[in-house]
Image (cartoon, rainbow, N blue to C red):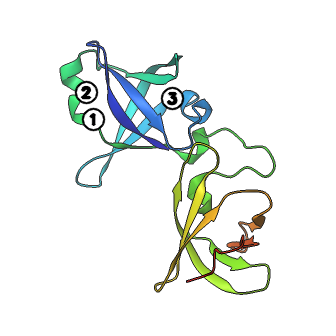
Amino acid sequence: MGKVAATHGIKGELRIAAYSGRFESILTLTHLLLKGPDDKMERFEVATSTVRGKKLVIALKDLDNINQVLHLVGREIYADRGELPELEEGEFYWCDLLGLKVVTDRGETLGTLTEIIATGSNDVYVVKNGIREYLVPALEDVVLNINLDDGIMVVSPPEGLLDL
């Protein structure tokens, strides 16, 4: 969902960078899962979560000193699926999109969606097939259909996307 970008103040608060650029999903969480350097998940109870200016700041229960949270900076944030809010029609969590097979509206397989890059204006889907990598803009006129049940995303590639 994001990562711990830095500490905030000296009272153990953490500044969070949301991968989607939106804080709403993280603000509703009662627990965070933080991925450690050994790839193990560590569960923390959220004491408070607030938006201060353009920053999302979270305090974890029983951690109230900067020295107790310094080791958490840089860790990726995950959440239990059941804690995530329901999405509007046509909206998807990134975790649901990763791994989708991406095909063009002409039936050509481009590869698998392996990464999502958040940019200022729209996300970009990184699609790889072992030989090539395509950067597909996440725009309504490009992404025509997403079928999670079938594991397929249909795209209409903009001019030049398929060129070598």
Mark 1 and 2 residues: CB-CB less than 8 Å, in contact?
A: yes
Q: Is residue 93 above or below residue 111?
A: above
Q: Which residue is mark 3?
A: 30
Kind of residue indicated by mark 3: Thr
Q: Given the image, on which type of amino acid does mark 2 rest?
A: Val
Which tag, 3 or 1, sits closer to the chain's start? 3
Q: Residue at x 21, y 34 (%)?
A: 71
Quadrant of image for the C terminus: bottom right
* 96 relative position to 107: left or right: left
**Label 3 neighbour load within 10 Å: few <14, some 14-19, many 20+:** some
In the figure, is residue 65 to the left or right of 3? left
Q: Mark 1, residues whose alpha carbon is within 10 Å: few (<14), some, or many (≥20)?
A: some
- Seen from the viewer's position, the closer of residues 119 and 13 is 119
Judging depth in this view, the residue of 108 and 33 nearest the camera is 108
Residue 157 image-quadrant placement: bottom right
Q: Residues within 10 Å of mark 2 (few under 14, many from 20)?
A: many
